[in-house]
Amino acid sequence: MELLIFYPIAGLSIALALGVIFNTSPVGSAMCLIGMMLGLSGIFVLLQAHFVAILQIIIYAGAIMVLFMFVIMLLNLKEAAAADWVTRDKNLFISIMSGVLAIGILYKIVDVIFMAELNSPATLPDSFGTVATIGEALFTDFVLPFEVASLLLLAAMIGAVVLAKPKLD
Amino acid sequence: MWVDLAITFVKILFVLAITVGFFAPVLTWVERKQSAIMQDRIGANRADILGFTVLGLFHIIADALKMFTKEDFIPQGANKILHTIAPIIAVVPALLTFAVVPFGGQYTLFGKEVNLVISDLDVGLLFVFAIASLATYGYVIAGWSSNNNWSLLGSMRTASQMISYEVTMGLTIVGVLMVYGSMKLTTIGAIQEDFFRWGLFLQPLGFVMFLAASIAENKRIPFDNPEAESEIVAGYFTEYSGLKFGMFFMAEFIEMVTIGAIMTILFFGAWHIPFLPTATLLGWFDFFGTTGSNLIVMFIQVGVFFTKIIFFIWLQMTIRWTLPRFRYDQIMKLGWKILLPLSLANILITGIVILVLN
């Protein structure tokens, strides 16, 4: 039963993820990305993590992607401009660096997946994935990473404001 | 298993029937009639069948016929796919919210516990907020795909306005969550059986801000900058006609019902009558047996819930026909410089009060 829901969602997510890369129009890419995020949140629901699934929708699909769309429309990127961007000169150094980074991240993901398969408990407690348990974990065991992440976000926010603010003098 | 599925199916049918089948068409007539009364006009009374006008109710049929038979027009240079799916993306979130809205309490019918909510999610309150944030796309894509500058301006205004007021909406929800200690909408509704624990009294500031933010999210006057007829023709739906325009129209009216429902659950005592707990009501009709008394109480409480929704729809319509449209910069100023700090202060005060009372 679970697999019957999982495979369509997973397949659709992968198809939409490919759509993000191969779409020539920026708005089309953004739409595919939104669809893929909804698919991801569906997979989180299958994993009994309702809270994370909803956060996925609120933060990524609901807030960040709306801003993306807003910027795309503000710059009014048309398909011609996007095609220019594809054929533009490429920086070899940056290409290699990002390739290495991507391989590193992929390796880590595969690593984590294999570890998780061995460690996962047979049955989940009832409270798994509820707001209360996640909140408790965030504010007790993981309070330091949590605070550091919020500081990092605050710094990024202030940086953006400073950069965007017109010079007064 | 099959009984549960059947019950869920009946609940979904009921919700669809009452929103799409009843509220959306009737509200088009109510809006005309109320604006007519408020502006001292006679109002919609021209459509007649064999001389009968029935207070202009036939205008609903005339409207539907007109929308079905109008030419479906896609402008030159428009993105055909996005232009076609945009109205669907706009309508779906408006309907989806009802999946977690309880329209009654829990009743024992024929030896079975029936919970009058389609899906009793642990994160129901957040689900409402998530769906509200997804609603933006339909309008944004509609304007962008039309290949029209008025439409694009309209959808840019939509995007900025909806992002701004989502912040306030989310922070107001935090206040409600702190007071009730649960994100389950059924639990929040059940707590408000006690009249003095209605959200209206526990979160008075939150109530006002949530109302303002949700009207802004629905883009109705005084926040109707995205369609401002006197400035940008009709904003994001300038290039829409026929049934596709009808879907935007319907989304607005269904959202009014949704706002009414959420306001009722969070702030207005859900399905409860003040000073009349469910147990007392059940006691009154005890002589009908368990199922009989439960059925009667169920009908009463569902009726109360929809009466409260109708009150909120009336409130939204009165606001719409009383106030003029805000200017774009005024909307931004209200959202970021007044409502946002106020909602943060609301959370702080709520936290302090809870700390002191405990």
Image: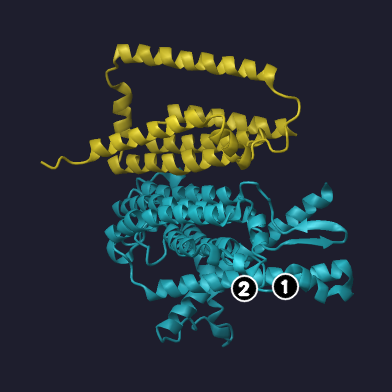
Instruction: Mark 2: give few (<14), some (14-19) or many (20+) Cα within 10 Å.
Output: some
Q: Residue at x 31, y 11 (%)?
A: A93
Residue B269: image location, x then y, percent? 62, 66
Q: Residue at x 52, y 61 (%)?
A: B255
* Side of B310 relative to A124 (left or right): left
Residue positioned most to the left: A169
Q: Is residue A24 above or below residue B348?
A: above
Say yes or no: labels 1 and 2 on the same chain: yes
Mark 1 belongs to which amino acid?
Ile
Residue A147: image location, x then y, percent? 45, 33
Looking at the rendered structure, the secondary structure element under dot 1 is helix
Q: Is residue A157 above or below residue B275?
A: above
Residue B24: image location, x then y, percent? 56, 66
Whether residue B243 appears in this view of the structure is no
Asked which quadrant contains residue B309, the reply is: bottom right
Whether residue A144 appears in this view of the structure is yes
Q: Which sits in the foreground, B27 or A102? A: A102
Q: Which sits in the foreground, B167 or A79? A: B167
* Side of A88 relative to B285 (left or right): left
Residue B307 is tagged as 2
Q: Is residue B167 above or below residue B250?
A: above
Residue B139: image location, x then y, percent? 43, 52
Q: Residue at x 57, y 39 (%)?
A: A135
Looking at the rendered structure, the secondary structure element under dot 2 is helix
Alpha carbon distance from label 1 to label 2: 10 Å
Mark 2 belongs to which amino acid?
Thr
Q: Are marks 1 and 2 in contact (CB under 8 Å)?
A: no
Residue B300 is tagged as 1
Q: Colour of chain B?
A: cyan
Chain letter for the residue marked with disc 1 in the picture: B
Q: Which sits in the foreground, B157 or A18? A: B157
Q: Colour of chain A?
A: yellow
